Amino acid sequence: MRHHEIDQYARRSPLNRFDPRVKIVSTAVLVISMAFLTELYPLLICLAFLLVLVAISKVPGKHLGKSYLMAFPFIFFASLTILVTSGPDPGLNMLLRITNSLIALLLLVSTTPFFDLLKSLRWFRVPSIISSLLLFTYRFIFVLLDELERMRIARKARGFNGGRNIFQKDALRTIAYTAGMVFVRSNTRAGNIYDALRSRGYDGEIRTLNRLRASPKDAGFACAFVGVSLIALSAQVGVIAWPL
Amino acid sequence: MAALRLTDVSFVYPDGIRALEKVSLAIGEGERIALVGPNGAGKSTLLRLMAALAIPTEGAVEIVGERLTKRNAERLRRHIGFLFQDPDDQIFMPTVWDDVAFGPINMQLSEEEVKGRVAEAIHLAGIDGYEQRVPHHLSFGEKKRVAIAGVLAMRAPILLLDEPTANLDPQGRKDLIEVLRSLPGTVLIATHDLAVALELTSRVLVLKRTILYDGDFDTLLEEPSVLGQANLELPPLCKLMVEWRNRTGKKFAIPRTVEEALDLLDES
């Protein structure tokens, strides 16, 4: 089964040239700044900046769009709640804030090889148990999906078509057994995968050949993010007026 | 000094299943050995013990002369290259190059050394040009070769291969046998496939929770009771030659390959 891997375009992206640590900090600065924005046009400034980065990144819009759509139900319901309780402007504001933050984070993970990202987190002294957890969670999602697909095909091959409705007792029982077996089989496979990693010297530390080395161009990258954050915050407090 | 030595090794799984019972054997440096047995014989369990991925419930496992314990397991593992039966369990990284490099990078070798080992391993496994391919998009046979390359890049002196030819098509099997034939060092191949064992190894261990037989193939071929106990079937060529020998009364070593058989028939 082919999977939608989050960093499949990372190596080809021009944004991969920047130090992952600088990218992490810059993204964090922008996302935290956006948390303080309650006006529409500062958020639009950030969105414009992010869309420019998307264009530069050479990550296909379809890839980012798929990832965005996975989170969209949560974004939608959060914004809808605010819309209903506080009105259209706060609702739109919430939608933009979450969307901007998500695009910033998607850009980070789509333009940085996953292992470099984890190695950078270790550089920031994030405990190795956390980076290992992230590594295995990401890897084992695909294991779970593969097992689920195998079980689905096996069921279908033996005539199971989902039943007439979800409340049909036999259908419910089959689905419950499937869910249980997926976890049992995934657990076995996860054990094998971990043994395979140990047999090739994995000891909990994330290692890559990529040496983390910041350079002047990374300063430029960071300045761009900090600059946009400052402009947005200035617009928020009224230091910069919206020209239109 | 034996590369691997097991003394009265038993292994019981947490659910009480006794997978191995008092297994004793010694494997010398440079030996090429087949480990054969039926399903559930304990082959994979035995390999895991030898690969220092598990500790025996009873008995002792010695790897390059050192007794395996929980404390030294990680260090002793560096002497072993283990090829898992399912390459999907072994392949972890986003590209073939990254996956083959995973082991050498964990060994904290220099960048130059890593690149050299990866290039060599990829060539030995016959997957030149695959470096930037996504492993999970490859065919089963190709993934097997990637997994083998990943093990070869470690340059471990002892290689343990769990069913290397399982689930391969005939061409894939043939190609892989050529790769396996060229492997350096001490090699132990766990397999159901006696034909592969005959082609690649000189000594055979028959396992069914315990060692039923440890010796050369020629003697094993004369032990139908052992073959029966282990639910093993001779390859068709061997069956034919054994039957011919019985009918004609001629005395000869059972040929292992078609070429050897043809030479023998020519001489007759």
Image (cartoon, coloured by chain):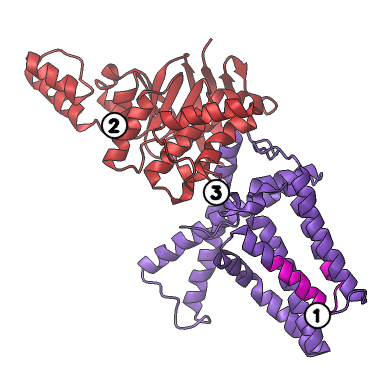
Chain colours: A purple, B red
Displayed quadrant of residue B200: top left
Say which of marks 1 and 3 sits in front.
1
Mark pair 3, 2: CA separation: 31 Å
Find residue B194 and report its horizontal and vertical position in percent: 30, 30
Same chain for the residues at labels 3 and 2, yes or no? no
Q: Secondary structure at mark 2?
A: helix
- Mark 1 is surrounded, within 10 Å at the Cα level, by few (under 14), some (14 to 19) or many (20 or more) other residues, namely some
Q: Secondary structure at mark 1?
A: helix
- Residue found 52% across the figure and 19% down from its top: B4
Give the amino acid type for the residue marked by disc 1 in the picture. Answer: Leu
Q: Chain of mark 1?
A: A
Which residue ends up furthest to the top in the rendered image? Answer: B1
Numbered range of the magenta stretch: A32-51
Residue topped by disc 2 = B228
Callout 3 environment at 10 Å: few (<14), some (14 to 19), or many (20+)? few
> Secondary structure of the magenta portion, mostly?
helix
Viewer-closest of B137 and A130: B137
Up-down relation of residue B33 to residue A97 (above or below): above
Question: Could one spot residue A132 in this view of the protein?
Answer: no
Q: What's the distance in space between the residues labelled 1 and 3, CA to CA?
A: 50 Å
Q: Secondary structure at mark 3?
A: helix
Q: Please say if B47 is above or below A44.
A: above
Residue closest to the eye, B117 or B156: B117
Q: Amino acid at mark 2?
A: Gly
Amino acid type at image mark 3: Thr
In the picture of the structure, the residue carrying the numbered disc 3 is A188
Q: Is residue A34 magenta?
A: yes
- Residue located beneath label 1 in the image: A40
At x 87%, y 74%, the residue is A235
Comparing labels 1 and 2, the label whose residue is closer to the camera = 1
Q: Is disc 2 surrounded by few (<14), some (14 to 19) or many (20+) residues within 10 Å?
A: few
